[in-house]
Image (cartoon, helix red, strand yellow):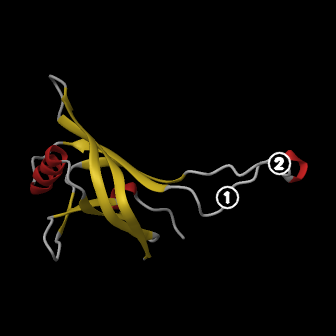
Amino acid sequence: MAAQAGKDMLLKISDGAQTPTFHTVAGLRVRTISLNAKTIDATDSDSAGRWRELLAGAGVKSVAVSGSGVFRDAASDAQVRQSFFDQSARVWRLVIPDFGQLEGAFLVAALDYAGEHDGEAAFALSLASAGVVTFTAL
């Protein structure tokens, strides 16, 4: 597989409809997608050689997403902002080119706006998975 351009990673928010339309979050320059699985330690006094044992398949899985970029005041910005204020779990689609896409319900856990006197207005967001996240290979 060849190297991938970071700009091709996409965060898309659904419009909330029964048959959703997804809108790419405008202005993003940086995106990070973290897949997490909390482990459960099942080590006891009978563990071989006192090595830690982990209970397979028992931990909590989650996905955390962060992104930042230039504030554009696009339609997607309004959807992200509304989702934050409502604290509603919207369906998001996270596209990683030539790898796959993740899709599921996420809450907007943080939404920051910033700007300097002689620079562009910027924003940053953090998403936390709020249910099952599916993976589809591309």
Q: In screen coordinates, is 2 left or right of 30?
A: right
What residue type is disc 1 on?
Answer: Leu
Q: Residue 109 appears in which quarter of the rendering?
A: top left
Q: In screen coordinates, is 59 left or right of 72?
A: right
Q: Is residue 63 above or below residue 120?
A: below
The residue positioned 24% from the left and 56% from the top of the image is 89
Front-lying residue, 36 or 53: 53
Residue at 84% across / 52% down in the picture? Answer: 47
Q: 80 above or below 1?
A: above
Marker disc for residue 134: none
Mark 2 crowdedness (10 Å alpha carbons): few <14, some 14-19, many ≥20: few
Residue at screen point 45% across, 55% down: 62
Amino acid type, mark 2: Trp
- The quarter holding residue 13 reads bottom left
Q: Secondary structure at mark 2?
A: loop
Residue 26 picture location, percent across and down: 19, 53
Q: Please say if 123 is above or below 41.
A: above
Residue closest to the far front: 45
How many numbered tags mark residues here? Answer: 2
Considering the image in quadrants, where does the N terminus appear?
bottom right
Position in image of residue 3 (x %, y %) = 50, 62
Report the disc number at residue 55: 1
Residue that extends furthest to the right in the rendered view of this protein? 49
Give the percent coordinates (x, y) of residue 107. 28, 51
Res 97 seen here: no
Please, what secondary structure does the residue beneath circle 1 have?
loop
Find residue 51 and name its label.
2
Quarter containing the C terminus: bottom left
